[in-house]
Amino acid sequence: MIYLLRHVTAYAYRNPVTQARCLLRLTPAEGDGQRVLSHRIGVDPLPHRRESGRDFFGNATLALTVETPHRAFRIEALSRVEVERMQLPDLASGLSWEEVRERALAVPSLGPDAPVHFTSPSRRVPVVAEVTDYARASFPPGGGAYAGAVDLMRRIRADFAFDATATEVATPLADAFAHRRGVCQDFAHIMIAGLRGLGLPAAYVSGYLRTRPPPGMARLEGADASHAWVSVWCGDGWHGLDPTNAIGVEDDHVVVARGRDYADVAPVAGIIAGSGAQTLQVAVDVVPEDEEAAAAG
Protein backbone atom coordinates (compact mmCIF):
# COMPACT_ATOMS: atom_id res chain seq x y z
CA MET A 1 0.00 0.00 0.00
CA ILE A 2 1.28 3.45 -0.94
CA TYR A 3 -0.03 6.43 1.02
CA LEU A 4 -0.05 10.13 0.29
CA LEU A 5 0.31 11.99 3.60
CA ARG A 6 -0.33 15.64 4.35
CA HIS A 7 0.14 17.10 7.84
CA VAL A 8 -0.54 20.82 8.31
CA THR A 9 0.16 22.66 11.58
CA ALA A 10 -0.95 26.30 11.70
CA TYR A 11 -0.41 28.75 14.57
CA ALA A 12 -2.04 32.18 14.82
CA TYR A 13 -0.78 34.71 17.37
CA ARG A 14 -2.61 37.73 18.80
CA ASN A 15 0.63 39.74 18.96
CA PRO A 16 3.66 39.50 16.65
CA VAL A 17 6.22 36.82 17.44
CA THR A 18 9.74 38.12 16.93
CA GLN A 19 11.57 34.79 17.00
CA ALA A 20 10.66 31.11 17.00
CA ARG A 21 12.76 28.03 17.46
CA CYS A 22 11.23 24.62 16.95
CA LEU A 23 12.11 20.98 16.44
CA LEU A 24 9.97 18.98 14.03
CA ARG A 25 9.45 15.22 13.93
CA LEU A 26 7.24 14.95 10.87
CA THR A 27 9.29 12.67 8.61
CA PRO A 28 7.94 9.09 8.36
CA ALA A 29 10.31 6.36 9.53
CA GLU A 30 12.20 3.91 7.34
CA GLY A 31 12.31 0.16 7.96
CA ASP A 32 10.06 -2.51 9.50
CA GLY A 33 8.03 -2.82 6.32
CA GLN A 34 7.92 0.91 5.61
CA ARG A 35 9.70 2.91 2.88
CA VAL A 36 9.64 6.67 2.32
CA LEU A 37 9.34 7.35 -1.41
CA SER A 38 9.32 11.14 -1.12
CA HIS A 39 9.07 13.76 1.61
CA ARG A 40 9.27 17.52 2.01
CA ILE A 41 8.43 20.09 4.67
CA GLY A 42 7.39 23.63 3.82
CA VAL A 43 7.46 26.45 6.38
CA ASP A 44 5.95 29.95 6.24
CA PRO A 45 7.55 32.33 7.06
CA LEU A 46 10.81 30.96 5.73
CA PRO A 47 13.28 30.05 8.48
CA HIS A 48 16.67 31.73 8.76
CA ARG A 49 18.24 28.43 9.80
CA ARG A 50 17.16 24.92 8.92
CA GLU A 51 19.10 21.86 10.08
CA SER A 52 18.20 18.20 9.55
CA GLY A 53 19.33 15.52 11.97
CA ARG A 54 18.36 12.47 14.00
CA ASP A 55 17.69 12.07 17.68
CA PHE A 56 18.98 9.26 19.90
CA PHE A 57 16.17 6.91 18.88
CA GLY A 58 16.85 7.44 15.18
CA ASN A 59 13.86 9.68 14.49
CA ALA A 60 14.40 12.21 11.71
CA THR A 61 14.35 15.79 13.04
CA LEU A 62 14.29 19.24 11.50
CA ALA A 63 15.44 22.20 13.62
CA LEU A 64 14.15 25.61 12.54
CA THR A 65 14.89 29.18 13.59
CA VAL A 66 12.53 31.92 12.36
CA GLU A 67 13.64 35.51 13.00
CA THR A 68 11.08 37.32 10.85
CA PRO A 69 8.32 38.92 12.99
CA HIS A 70 5.07 37.09 12.26
CA ARG A 71 1.52 36.55 13.47
CA ALA A 72 0.99 33.27 11.65
CA PHE A 73 3.25 30.24 11.41
CA ARG A 74 2.43 27.35 9.09
CA ILE A 75 4.17 23.98 8.64
CA GLU A 76 3.14 21.57 5.90
CA ALA A 77 4.66 18.08 5.64
CA LEU A 78 3.99 16.10 2.46
CA SER A 79 5.05 12.46 2.16
CA ARG A 80 4.61 9.45 -0.07
CA VAL A 81 5.15 6.23 1.86
CA GLU A 82 4.96 2.55 0.97
CA VAL A 83 3.84 0.17 3.74
CA GLU A 84 4.00 -3.62 3.52
CA ARG A 85 4.41 -5.28 6.89
CA MET A 86 4.81 -8.89 7.89
CA GLN A 87 1.88 -10.91 9.20
CA LEU A 88 1.07 -10.50 12.89
CA PRO A 89 2.52 -13.17 15.24
CA ASP A 90 0.42 -16.09 16.40
CA LEU A 91 -0.97 -15.53 19.89
CA ALA A 92 0.25 -18.95 20.98
CA SER A 93 3.82 -18.32 19.86
CA GLY A 94 6.74 -16.70 21.60
CA LEU A 95 8.36 -16.62 25.02
CA SER A 96 6.70 -16.34 28.39
CA TRP A 97 6.51 -12.87 29.82
CA GLU A 98 8.80 -13.84 32.70
CA GLU A 99 11.48 -14.98 30.24
CA VAL A 100 11.10 -11.80 28.19
CA ARG A 101 11.54 -9.74 31.35
CA GLU A 102 14.81 -11.54 32.13
CA ARG A 103 16.10 -11.36 28.55
CA ALA A 104 15.42 -7.64 28.31
CA LEU A 105 17.95 -6.98 31.07
CA ALA A 106 20.50 -9.36 29.54
CA VAL A 107 20.65 -7.80 26.06
CA PRO A 108 24.15 -6.24 25.83
CA SER A 109 23.26 -3.56 23.29
CA LEU A 110 22.67 0.06 24.31
CA GLY A 111 21.65 1.13 20.81
CA PRO A 112 18.38 2.92 20.00
CA ASP A 113 16.42 -0.35 19.74
CA ALA A 114 17.81 -1.87 22.95
CA PRO A 115 14.94 -2.97 25.20
CA VAL A 116 16.66 -1.61 28.32
CA HIS A 117 15.75 1.97 27.29
CA PHE A 118 12.06 1.12 27.48
CA THR A 119 11.75 -0.71 30.79
CA SER A 120 12.12 2.20 33.23
CA PRO A 121 9.79 5.12 34.06
CA SER A 122 10.03 8.13 31.77
CA ARG A 123 8.89 11.75 31.88
CA ARG A 124 5.29 11.08 30.82
CA VAL A 125 5.07 7.43 31.91
CA PRO A 126 5.70 6.88 35.62
CA VAL A 127 5.16 3.44 37.09
CA VAL A 128 1.81 3.62 38.91
CA ALA A 129 0.90 0.74 41.24
CA GLU A 130 -2.77 0.75 40.22
CA VAL A 131 -1.85 0.56 36.53
CA THR A 132 0.61 -2.27 37.16
CA ASP A 133 -2.08 -4.21 39.05
CA TYR A 134 -4.51 -3.62 36.19
CA ALA A 135 -1.98 -4.97 33.66
CA ARG A 136 -1.04 -7.98 35.80
CA ALA A 137 -4.43 -9.60 35.14
CA SER A 138 -3.35 -10.12 31.51
CA PHE A 139 -0.15 -11.95 32.46
CA PRO A 140 -0.77 -15.19 34.37
CA PRO A 141 2.31 -17.19 35.44
CA GLY A 142 3.94 -18.74 32.40
CA GLY A 143 1.72 -16.88 29.96
CA GLY A 144 3.06 -15.66 26.65
CA ALA A 145 4.40 -12.11 26.52
CA TYR A 146 2.76 -11.28 23.19
CA ALA A 147 -0.55 -12.92 24.13
CA GLY A 148 -0.57 -10.98 27.39
CA ALA A 149 0.14 -7.69 25.64
CA VAL A 150 -2.69 -8.33 23.18
CA ASP A 151 -5.06 -9.12 26.04
CA LEU A 152 -4.06 -5.91 27.84
CA MET A 153 -4.62 -3.93 24.64
CA ARG A 154 -8.11 -5.40 24.25
CA ARG A 155 -9.03 -4.73 27.88
CA ILE A 156 -8.01 -1.08 27.56
CA ARG A 157 -10.21 -0.77 24.49
CA ALA A 158 -13.13 -2.31 26.38
CA ASP A 159 -12.68 -0.53 29.71
CA PHE A 160 -11.79 3.01 28.57
CA ALA A 161 -13.90 5.53 26.66
CA PHE A 162 -12.47 7.67 23.87
CA ASP A 163 -13.23 11.27 24.86
CA ALA A 164 -11.32 14.10 23.22
CA THR A 165 -12.52 16.55 25.87
CA ALA A 166 -11.45 14.51 28.90
CA THR A 167 -7.71 15.14 28.77
CA GLU A 168 -5.06 17.52 27.44
CA VAL A 169 -1.51 16.88 26.27
CA ALA A 170 -0.15 17.43 29.79
CA THR A 171 -2.82 15.44 31.68
CA PRO A 172 -1.05 13.01 34.07
CA LEU A 173 -1.33 9.36 33.18
CA ALA A 174 -2.81 8.55 36.60
CA ASP A 175 -5.71 10.96 36.00
CA ALA A 176 -6.64 9.42 32.65
CA PHE A 177 -6.44 5.96 34.22
CA ALA A 178 -8.62 6.93 37.18
CA HIS A 179 -11.34 8.43 34.98
CA ARG A 180 -11.11 5.67 32.35
CA ARG A 181 -11.33 8.29 29.60
CA GLY A 182 -8.96 9.94 27.16
CA VAL A 183 -7.44 9.79 23.69
CA CYS A 184 -4.87 7.65 21.91
CA GLN A 185 -1.95 9.32 23.71
CA ASP A 186 -3.50 8.46 27.09
CA PHE A 187 -4.27 4.85 26.16
CA ALA A 188 -0.75 4.32 24.82
CA HIS A 189 0.80 5.79 27.97
CA ILE A 190 -1.42 3.64 30.21
CA MET A 191 -0.55 0.46 28.34
CA ILE A 192 3.16 1.29 28.41
CA ALA A 193 3.03 2.00 32.16
CA GLY A 194 1.35 -1.35 32.78
CA LEU A 195 3.91 -3.26 30.74
CA ARG A 196 6.90 -1.48 32.28
CA GLY A 197 5.47 -2.03 35.74
CA LEU A 198 5.84 -5.75 35.04
CA GLY A 199 9.36 -5.30 33.68
CA LEU A 200 8.41 -5.61 29.99
CA PRO A 201 9.92 -3.19 27.44
CA ALA A 202 7.36 -0.94 25.75
CA ALA A 203 7.84 2.07 23.46
CA TYR A 204 5.56 4.94 22.43
CA VAL A 205 4.98 5.26 18.68
CA SER A 206 3.56 8.27 16.85
CA GLY A 207 2.24 8.24 13.32
CA TYR A 208 -0.92 8.02 11.29
CA LEU A 209 -3.79 5.58 10.87
CA ARG A 210 -5.74 5.20 7.67
CA THR A 211 -9.41 5.90 8.31
CA ARG A 212 -12.23 4.65 6.13
CA PRO A 213 -15.40 6.73 5.58
CA PRO A 214 -18.81 5.03 5.90
CA PRO A 215 -20.05 3.31 2.72
CA GLY A 216 -21.24 5.86 0.18
CA MET A 217 -19.62 8.78 2.00
CA ALA A 218 -16.65 10.77 0.73
CA ARG A 219 -13.54 11.35 2.80
CA LEU A 220 -13.46 14.69 4.58
CA GLU A 221 -10.29 16.59 3.73
CA GLY A 222 -8.12 17.08 6.80
CA ALA A 223 -10.37 14.88 8.95
CA ASP A 224 -7.65 12.42 9.90
CA ALA A 225 -5.35 13.07 12.84
CA SER A 226 -2.02 12.08 14.29
CA HIS A 227 -2.21 8.77 16.10
CA ALA A 228 -0.28 6.96 18.82
CA TRP A 229 0.16 3.33 19.77
CA VAL A 230 2.54 0.95 21.56
CA SER A 231 5.46 -1.21 20.47
CA VAL A 232 6.24 -4.08 22.84
CA TRP A 233 9.45 -6.11 22.87
CA CYS A 234 8.72 -9.84 23.16
CA GLY A 235 12.23 -11.30 22.95
CA ASP A 236 11.97 -11.90 19.20
CA GLY A 237 11.65 -8.24 18.22
CA TRP A 238 9.22 -5.36 18.51
CA HIS A 239 5.50 -5.72 17.80
CA GLY A 240 3.04 -2.85 17.35
CA LEU A 241 -0.29 -2.86 19.21
CA ASP A 242 -2.96 -0.15 19.04
CA PRO A 243 -4.98 0.02 22.30
CA THR A 244 -7.28 2.75 20.99
CA ASN A 245 -8.66 0.35 18.40
CA ALA A 246 -7.62 -3.03 19.85
CA ILE A 247 -5.76 -4.04 16.69
CA GLY A 248 -2.26 -5.10 15.78
CA VAL A 249 -0.21 -2.71 13.68
CA GLU A 250 -0.36 -3.71 10.02
CA ASP A 251 -0.51 -1.81 6.74
CA ASP A 252 -3.06 0.80 7.90
CA HIS A 253 -0.53 2.34 10.32
CA VAL A 254 2.26 4.68 9.21
CA VAL A 255 5.10 5.16 11.72
CA VAL A 256 6.68 8.58 12.13
CA ALA A 257 8.67 8.41 15.38
CA ARG A 258 9.33 6.20 18.38
CA GLY A 259 10.49 6.98 21.91
CA ARG A 260 9.85 6.39 25.59
CA ASP A 261 6.70 8.53 25.63
CA TYR A 262 5.06 11.48 23.88
CA ALA A 263 7.77 13.88 25.02
CA ASP A 264 10.30 12.02 22.84
CA VAL A 265 8.20 12.15 19.66
CA ALA A 266 6.17 15.39 19.72
CA PRO A 267 5.59 16.43 16.07
CA VAL A 268 6.30 20.11 16.84
CA ALA A 269 8.15 21.35 19.91
CA GLY A 270 9.92 24.60 20.68
CA ILE A 271 9.78 28.13 22.05
CA ILE A 272 8.66 31.54 20.78
CA ALA A 273 9.54 35.11 21.74
CA GLY A 274 6.22 36.90 22.06
CA SER A 275 3.22 37.53 24.28
CA GLY A 276 -0.52 37.11 24.08
CA ALA A 277 -2.84 34.28 23.18
CA GLN A 278 -2.35 31.83 20.34
CA THR A 279 -4.50 29.33 18.48
CA LEU A 280 -3.46 26.05 16.89
CA GLN A 281 -5.06 24.13 14.05
CA VAL A 282 -3.88 20.73 12.82
CA ALA A 283 -5.14 18.91 9.73
CA VAL A 284 -3.99 15.47 8.56
CA ASP A 285 -4.79 13.54 5.39
CA VAL A 286 -3.89 9.86 4.95
CA VAL A 287 -4.97 8.81 1.47
CA PRO A 288 -4.10 5.58 -0.38
CA GLU A 289 -2.52 6.53 -3.68
CA ASP A 290 -4.89 4.30 -5.68
CA GLU A 291 -7.89 6.10 -4.15
CA GLU A 292 -6.39 9.47 -5.05
CA ALA A 293 -5.82 8.30 -8.62
CA ALA A 294 -9.38 6.96 -8.87
CA ALA A 295 -10.81 10.24 -7.58
CA ALA A 296 -8.73 12.21 -10.08
CA GLY A 297 -9.92 9.95 -12.88
Image (tube, rainbow, N blue to C red):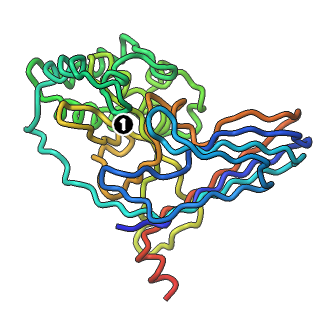
**Foreground residue, 148 or 119?**
119
**Foreground residue, 141 or 69?**
69
Element type where label 1 sits in the image: strand
- Position of the N terminus, as image quadrant, is bottom left
Residue name at image x 80 percent, y 40 percent: 278
Q: Position of residue 140 (x, y in %)?
A: 13, 20
183 lies above or below 127 = below
- The image quarter containing residue 90 is top left
Q: Amino acid at mark 1?
A: Val
Q: Which residue is mark 1?
A: 230
Residue name at image x 72 percent, y 52 percent: 10
33 lies above or below 118 = below
**Foreground residue, 270 or 165?**
270
Badge count: 1
Residue name at image x 36 percent, y 10 percent: 129
**Foreground residue, 167 or 263?**
263
30 with respect to 65 (left or right): left
Q: Position of residue 67 (x, y in %)?
A: 85, 44
Q: Position of residue 79 (x, y in %)?
A: 52, 62
Q: Position of residue 76 (x, y in %)?
A: 65, 58
12 with respect to 154 (left or right): right
241 lies above or below 173 = below
